[in-house]
Image (spheres, helix red, strand yellow):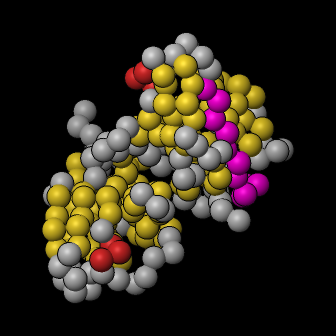
Amino acid sequence: QKEVEQNSGPLSVPEGAIASLNCTYSDRGSQSFFWYRQYSGKSPELIMFIYSNGDKEDGRFTAQLNKASQYVSLLIRDSQPSDSATYLCAVRANDYKLSFGAGTTVTVRA
Amino acid sequence: KAGVTQTPRYLIKTRGQQVTLSCSPISGHRSVSWYQQTPGQGLQFLFEYFSETQRNKGNFPGRFSGRQFSNSRSEMNVSTLELGDSALYLCASSRTGADSPLHFGNGTRLTVT
């Protein structure tokens, strides 16, 4: 079982719609959770982090965490063409190692 | 505030050679992590250094090694290069603490021919 799994893409959404990205993790002791965005040919950049169960909103992005289900998600509201990228879920376990999912590629259609 | 700096940006090596990649973290960041990114495998964790000590290690062969200096700068070395080592090598730094996110450099693109 992979440490971090993301829903396979690619995900194509029309401009203005909500993009929903999912991620599950295997280590129940994981402490902190991050979402990164990576444009083609660029390095990953942090867009959100969440540590506590529930929702966390930052602009058009909402991260949701459910530790009991070992599940974290990212919603992108009012999707824009500039949101077209690969989104990486990252999970930090007690040993401080940050493990990444394979990523979900999102394409926003104008 | 300067970001994470990786040098060189591009490298072309032949099989059997060795290579050293360099990473300067963000000022004040004491943890440096290295990742290998390939189209088929995604981001694979190589190792993490904190205060000059390797704190974590991924599942890579011993040909991959690293170190961290007292100023937190880090290097990784790959010996006896193989074609499969062609990848983007990313360095990332962070503050201490489990809630500290990683900040990535622009990466070193290694091509082994």
Tell me, yes or no, if residue B17 can be seen here. Answer: yes
Q: How many marks do you count on the picture?
A: 0
Residue A102: where, in percent of width, then height? 54, 53
Residue, x 28% and y 52% (percent of image)? B107
Left or right placement of residue A97 versus residue A24 in this view:
left
Residue, x 17% and y 79% (percent of image)? B14
Q: Is residue A69 above or below residue A81?
A: below
* On-image quarter of the N terminus of chain A: bottom right
Q: Most extreme residue toward the right, as rendered? A: A68
Left or right placement of residue A109 versus residue A54 in this view:
left
Q: Is residue B46 above or below residue A19?
A: below
Residue, x 48% and y 22% (percent of image)? A109
Left or right placement of residue A25 versus residue A96 in this view:
right
Residue A48: where, in percent of width, then height? 53, 31
Residue B37: where, in percent of width, then height? 40, 58
* On-image quarter of the C terminus of chain A: top left
Residue, x 44% and y 30% (percent of image)? A84
The quadrant where residue B7 appears: bottom left
Q: Is residue B23 above or below residue A63?
A: below
Residue A81: where, in percent of width, then height? 43, 21
The quadrant where residue A9 appears: top right
The quadrant where residue B76 appears: bottom left
Tell me, yes or no, if residue B50 can be seen here. Answer: no
Residues shaded magenta: A19-29
Left or right placement of residue A61 versus residue B90 in this view:
right
Q: Main secondary structure of the magenta part?
A: strand
Question: As rendered, which of B107 and A93 lies closer to the eye?
Answer: B107
